[in-house]
């Protein structure tokens, strides 16, 4: 991206509204300006007769979007600012709008798709992955919790695969993403130019069908039995105990290590959020809940510490507070679900 280029490119080409996230050096991490630009374009195109279909993709070779602009959020968290709250309010409203968008919305989920990247892609009507796709919600690893509608999507994955993905903070392949319900179609990356060309002359269903292939076998699907048995527990402590019971050298024991590397507070809040989201009637209701969690998370010591350890200093040795699962009591978790002083997000639930 040159100094003159915006961080989100929007234009109309051959009856297609094109949105390209344009911060390739940051793997197209979302900032507030990008969220506003996407929202403005979608709002204008919703009633624009020149636009039949919207396509979202990312600049560069590394991925669609690595998530939110963590550095700016880190500075906000350390200084007690409120800019992140304004960003999340607009971002989460955009996520809900994408899910209800009146025109086909084709998301090209090529390369890395993390956190906020899922929010602008996985709520679309046509969600495409490639052999290069690596998708995930790694928030518990930085002391935060899944947001952008992620708890709604993951809570509706087959069995406990969504719980596994959220608590281990791991990455999924494109095939995994389809199996879990975060994507719909597998398109080899070398066919993406053909897809864009097809969309100029075909309806999106036909265009996607013309280039899509059967996805490879999902590695995650093969682990379903032990994942369901372990991650169906009511508490994080019990999940870890069941994983450890599988014994050294097993995938389950490795998963326990991955879970325990994350923020104890974030793990407990996330598990409660997933169980709650599974019972909520709409995406909007889940996003409202996530906003309450995000407001509390911004003031949590684990959030700034997690970003410091993983992104800033990169020592990979976060000092969580509280340090253990057993020290995280229900009262602390409750705070993440209380209405914030700054006001709730207040999305109006769509009719069921």
Image (cartoon, grey):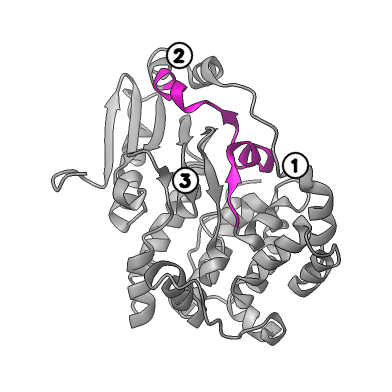
Q: Position of residue 272 (x, y in %)?
A: 69, 68
Q: Which residue is mark 3?
A: 112
The residue under the point 84% across, 66% down is: 242
Q: Is residue 280 visible?
A: no
**Which secondary structure lies at badge 1?**
helix
Image marks 2 and 3: residues in contact by CB distance under 8 Å: no
Labels 1 & 2 near each other (Cβ < 8 A) = no
Q: Which residues are magenta?
A: 170-195
**Of circles 1 and 2, which is in front?**
1
The residue carrying mark 2 is: 202
- Tell me what residue is drawn at x 49 percent, y 21 percent: 204
Residue holding disc 1: 221
Q: Quadrant of the rendered structure where residue 258 is? A: bottom right
Magenta highlight on residue 323? no
Residue extending farthest left: 4
Residue 151, horizontal then vertical, whole percent: 62, 57
Q: Residue at x 50, y 63 (%)?
A: 346
Element under disc 2:
loop
The CA span between labels 2 and 3 is: 28 Å
Is tag 1's residue or tag 2's residue first in the polypeptide sequence?
Answer: 2
Residue 171 appears in view: yes
Q: Is residue 40 left or right of residue 92?
A: left
In the image, is 82 to the left or to the right of 209?
left
Which residue is found at the position 71% from the left and 61% from the top?
A: 255
Which quadrant would the N terminus be assigned to in this image? top left
Q: In x, y percent, where is residue 40?
A: 31, 44
């Amino acid at each position: 991206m040159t100094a003159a280029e915006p961080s989100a490119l929007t234009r109309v080409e051959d009856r297609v509204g094109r949105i390209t996230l344009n911060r390739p050096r940051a793997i197209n991490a979302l900032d507030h300006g990008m969220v506003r630009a996407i929202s403005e374009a979608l709002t204008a195109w919703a009633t624009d007769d020149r636009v039949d279909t919207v396509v979202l993709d990312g600049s560069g070779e590394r991925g669609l979007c690595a998530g939110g602009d963590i550095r700016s959020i880190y500075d906000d968290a350390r200084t007690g600012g409120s800019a992140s709250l304004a960003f999340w309010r607009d971002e989460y409203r955009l996520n809900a709008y994408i899910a209800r968008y009146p025109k086909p919305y084709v998301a090209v989920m090529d390369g890395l798709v993390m956190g906020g990247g899922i929010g602008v892609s996985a709520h679309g009507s046509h969600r495409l992955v490639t052999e290069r796709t690596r998708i995930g919600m790694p928030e518990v690893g930085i002391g935060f919790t899944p947001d952008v509608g992620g708890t709604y999507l993951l809570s509706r994955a087959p069995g406990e695969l969504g719980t596994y993905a959220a608590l281990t903070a791991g990455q999924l392949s494109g095939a995994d993403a389809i199996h879990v319900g975060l994507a719909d179609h597998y398109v080899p990356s070398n066919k993406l130019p053909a897809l864009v060309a097809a969309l100029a002359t075909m309806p999106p269903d036909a265009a996607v069908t013309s280039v899509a292939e059967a996805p490879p076998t999902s590695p995650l699907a093969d682990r379903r039995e032990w994942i369901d048995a372990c991650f169906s527990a009511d508490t994080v402590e019990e999940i870890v105990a069941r994983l450890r019971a599988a014994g050294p050298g097993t995938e389950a024991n490795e998963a326990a290590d991955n879970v325990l590397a994350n923020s104890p507070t974030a793990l407990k809040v996330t598990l409660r959020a997933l169980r709650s989201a599974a019972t909520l009637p709409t995406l909007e209701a889940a996003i409202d809940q996530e906003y309450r969690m995000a407001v509390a998370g911004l003031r949590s010591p684990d959030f700034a510490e997690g970003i410091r350890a993983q992104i800033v200093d990169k020592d990979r040795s976060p000092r969580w507070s509280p340090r253990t699962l057993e020290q995280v009591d229900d009262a602390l978790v409750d705070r993440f679900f209380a209405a914030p002083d700054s006001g709730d997000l207040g999305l109006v639930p769509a009719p069921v």
